[in-house]
């Protein structure tokens, strides 16, 4: 019974220290008052779609899982007719030591841009760069 209690305490402590808060945000930097439709999901969660006006930001804060496999997928559609679209991975934890990162996405006229603001155990900071073109 003592070994079981010790094992249970170790598992609880590991769960507490391995879960780190991370986030991603998606900013609408489209011109001409174009709205941005956003829908995101993970293995365990599906967020309701939202529409953001130019200058507004969609932000999702969450805790990573114990195994280091937290991933969020998103679909963006550019208004007014929402014909320009793109599906992509908005956050992808590479390992349990990949902790504390913020993935900063920007929807612009010529594509979707990304900058990763890393935490203390990040996989590597990434400068703002064009990650995707819009699909027509």
Image (cartoon, rainbow, N blue to C red):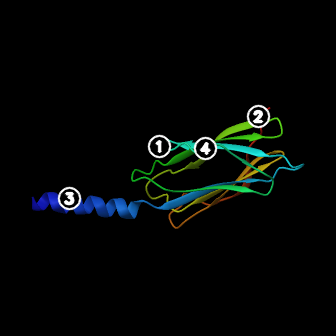
On residue 48, which mark appears? Answer: 4
Q: Pick whichever of labels 3 and 1 is earlier in the sequence.
A: 3
Tell me the CA gap for discs 1 and 2. Answer: 27 Å
Residue at the (35%, 59%) spot, across then down: 15
Crowding at mark 3 (Cα within 10 Å: few <14, some 14-19, many 20+) = few
For label 1, the residue is 44
Q: Give the image location of residue 81, x and y in percent.
A: 82, 35
For label 2, the residue is 135
Q: Point out the residue furthest to the bottom here.
A: 120
Q: Pick whichever of labels 4 and 2 is earlier in the sequence.
A: 4
Give the vertical position of 2 relative to 54 (above or below): below
Residue at the (18%, 62%) spot, across then down: 6
Crowding at mark 4 (Cα within 10 Å: few <14, some 14-19, many 20+) = few
Tell me the CA gap for discs 4 and 1. Answer: 13 Å
Give the vertical position of 58 relative to 13 (above or below): above
Q: Give the image location of residue 114, x and y in percent.
A: 70, 53
Tell me the CA gap for discs 3 and 2. Answer: 51 Å
Crowding at mark 1 (Cα within 10 Å: few <14, some 14-19, many 20+) = few
Q: How many marks?
A: 4
Marks 1 & 2, CB-CB < 8 Å contact: no
In this view, the mark in front (4 or 3): 4
Q: Where's the C terminus, which quadrant?
A: top right
Question: In this rendering, would 64 be left or right of 89?
Answer: left
In front of the other: 55 or 114: 55
Question: In this rendering, would 16 be left or right of 55?
Answer: left
On residue 108, which mark appears? Answer: none
Say which element carries label 2: loop
Tell me the CA gap for discs 4 and 2. Answer: 22 Å
For label 3, the residue is 7
Q: Pick whichever of labels 4 and 3 is earlier in the sequence.
A: 3
């Amino acid at each position: 019974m003592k070994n079981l209690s010790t094992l249970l305490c170790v598992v609880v402590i590991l769960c507490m220290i391995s879960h780190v808060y991370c986030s991603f945000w998606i900013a609408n930097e489209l011109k001409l008052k174009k709205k941005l439709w956003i829908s995101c999901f993970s293995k365990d969660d599906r967020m309701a779609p939202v529409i953001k006006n130019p200058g507004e930001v969609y932000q999702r804060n969450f805790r990573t899982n114990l195994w280091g496999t937290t991933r969020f997928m998103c679909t963006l559609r550019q208004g007014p007719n929402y014909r320009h679209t793109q599906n992509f991975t908005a956050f992808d934890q590479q390992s349990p030591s990949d902790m504390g990162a913020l993935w900063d996405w920007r929807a612009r006229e010529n594509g979707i841009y990304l900058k990763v603001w890393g935490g203390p155990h990040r996989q590597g900071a990434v400068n703002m760069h064009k990650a995707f073109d819009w699909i027509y």
